[in-house]
Image (tube, rainbow, N blue to C red):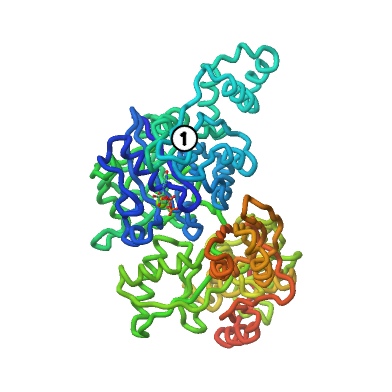
Amino acid sequence: MRTLNLGILAHVDAGKTTLTERLLFAAGVIDEVGSVDDGSTQTDSLALERQRGITIKSAVVSFAVGDVTVNLIDTPGHPDFIAEVERVLGVLDGAVLVASAVEGVQAQTRVLMRTLQRLGIPTLLFINKIDRAGADTERVLHGISDRLTLAIVPMGAAYGQGTRGAGFTPYGPGDRAFTAQLADVLAEHDDELLADYVHDASRLSHGRLAAALAAQARRGLVHPVFAGSAMTGAGVDHLTAGLTGLLPAADRKAEADLPVSASVFKVERGPAGEKIAYVRMFSGTLRARTRVRIDSLGSEGEGKVTAISVFSSGGTRDSQAVAAGQIGKVWGLPGVQIGNALGEPPPARAQRHFAPPSLETVVVPARAADKGALHAALTQLAEQDPLINLRQDDVRSELLVSLYGEVQKEVIQATLADVFGLDVGFRETTTICIERPVGCGAAVEFIGQPPNPFLAGIGLRVDPAPPGTGMEFGLEIELGALPFSFLKAVRETVYETLRQGVYGWQVTDITVTMTHSGYWPRQSHAHAHFDKSMSSTAGDFRNLTPLVLMSALSEAGTQVYEPIHRFLVEIPADTLGAVLPVLAKLLAVPLEQAMRGSLSVVEGDVPAGAVHELQQRLPALTRGEGVLESAFDHYQQVRGEIPLRPRSDHNPLNRKDEIMRERGAARRVPLDPDVVVRA
Ligand SMILES: Nc1nc2c(ncn2[C@@H]2O[C@H](COP(=O)(O)OP(=O)(O)OP(=O)(O)O)[C@@H](O)[C@H]2O)c(=O)[nH]1
Ligand SMILES: [Mg+2]
């Protein structure tokens, strides 16, 4: 049996959930096609999803096509829930990217395609909704070539577009234009094919081209394009055949005997509050009632699997084991988190593929007495969505969460009410900026040299790193010069400290190098026992690191960057005069302007913090006809007044003298001639 772990991805409302229903129906798993509009689909199973008619959480369903078990993951398209997409990207063998035949390539379509290509995930495209008025697959194909990729092969043509009778006819061996296009696109990545194409095109039989297409599509080099209607079922059989013929479904029996390696991509709570981990097995076989190593980026634990279920024919069934290639639900690992590895680390670890949330807000319980319950509830939500990054502001004792947008905020509010019975409100949403170092900076505190009251010597240098690289910690001291536990304390504290830079924002795209180190080993005068006043502890390193790092960072200087979205508004042409001044007021910068029939289309950059206001003001300015799309695009340096993070008095340098004094009084540093000082 082969398996294919397949993601369905698209801009919001393109028809992913409806297509999922259709695929399940075509595979004979369900007798009736459910409808998003009636709240009766398999994958939009949360009450909130059914009420709102949008997908909020990724959901897995399984069906068989011939000898292939397809584990399909239906993802949300709304940009506020992009984190759900991010978490599944690492477990996919292939994807179907859906675009609407009416709306065509949209903001999120581009973001998703870019990411799928960067990760080399084999992807088929499906142009959906050919039955809807205004459907035009040719226009969408042009849009795909223009804005997504040239490496596409349309697999057939739509007929009767815009009517209930719309359908899809696949091209065959007799279609010379199709064969010519295949040769054209495939020769790009196949030198032998290219040579024959140039010298003797007659050698390129349709059979050979079809085999080359499958091979290249399975490697993610070209993208076959299908069209149809998830609503009427047109074209869905051809897409289904493409799933098994053009994506890398594999038999992984041989890998089932290797050591266990799996990744956790989703965590949920069962009816009794028990933790359930969704795992994708990369190799080995995980069995019920056995112990497994849990690796969470450096720290390790272990857990005993109590039960397993696997996805099968639309539902799940209990199983004794889950093996290489499969997706399963695993019980019995209370400490497990999203992104953890089970057993050996899998080839590609959970990574950042999309921009982090760019907004934040304070969650306020309606009743002050609910504060503890709110903290517990948000902790559970953060377990399912770590990117909300729940944190407590110690200065004001408030709970903060990070957000992608206002819809996510509403969903958090509704979930707290429905699931936890908690009534909450929010403070105003603010933008999360980032800080990047401008130049190099260095600082050092030697051990035993006043005023350094800590039994630790630390030197750190900071250097700017290219955008997108995040944070890196390197060593210019000899390996072994510092005991590992002290080194670990420094490294962890460096990462922790960089969460709030000079202006209070997360510092990123930075390399921190440890240039000096010194410690006093375990020692005592007369007695052979550990004397804390004379021997370095990890605590000394943890306390000193922020002071040294912030000094280095202040010397380097930092610049603050704010998140910028790429927006597109489509509005009746006669309302352009009313919309442009509002764009200007919101500091949006139009970059392109065009006419599409009676509509004006404006594309440009807008600060992330202004997107919501633009969304709210557009209907009144455009008689309710304006459409806004936006997606994070880049960070831009803030000019003018530098925004300090609200509620932040984080910088330990502001209290340096005080910290040094307090510490010095608490411990008289003995000056011992036998000290070990390494620099
Ligand atoms: N006419 C027509 N309508 C469709 C088709 N596919 C989906 N729809 C409708 O489009 C709307 C959105 O469909 P969904 O399946 O929820 O889209 P989605 O991509 O899952 O949306 P999100 O998960 O919220 O991003 C619903 O009203 C569907 O009934 C289609 O092929 N033709
Ligand atoms: Mg959906």
Residue 651 % position (x, y)? 62, 78
As drawn, 63 above or below 510: above
Q: Residues within 10 Å of mark 1 (few under 14, many from 20)?
A: few
Residue furthest right in the image: 439
Residue type marked 1: Gly
As drawn, 495 above or below 42: below
99 or 665, nearer to the observer: 99
Figure quadrant of the N terminus: top left
The residue sitting at 57% across, 52% down in the picture is 107
As drawn, 159 above or below 10: above
The residue sitting at 55% across, 39% down in the picture is 120
Compared across the picture, whether 386 is left or right of 369 comes to: right
Query: In this rendering, does residue 93 appear at all?
Result: yes
Residue 337 % position (x, y)? 40, 57
Residue 396 % position (x, y)? 50, 84
Compared across the picture, whether 661 is left or right of 226 comes to: right
Residue 27 % position (x, y)? 31, 35
Q: Which SS class for mark 1?
A: loop
642 or 159, nearer to the observer: 159
Label 1 near ligand 1 (CB < 8 Å): no
Q: How many marks?
A: 1
247 or 484, nearer to the observer: 247
Figure quadrant of the C terminus: bottom right
The residue sitting at 49% across, 79% down in the picture is 427
Query: In this rendering, does residue 472 appear at all?
Result: no
Instruction: Give the quarter of the image for residue 444.
Output: bottom right
Instruction: Give the quarter of the image for residue 181.
Output: top right
Q: Which residue has dot 1 on it?
A: 160
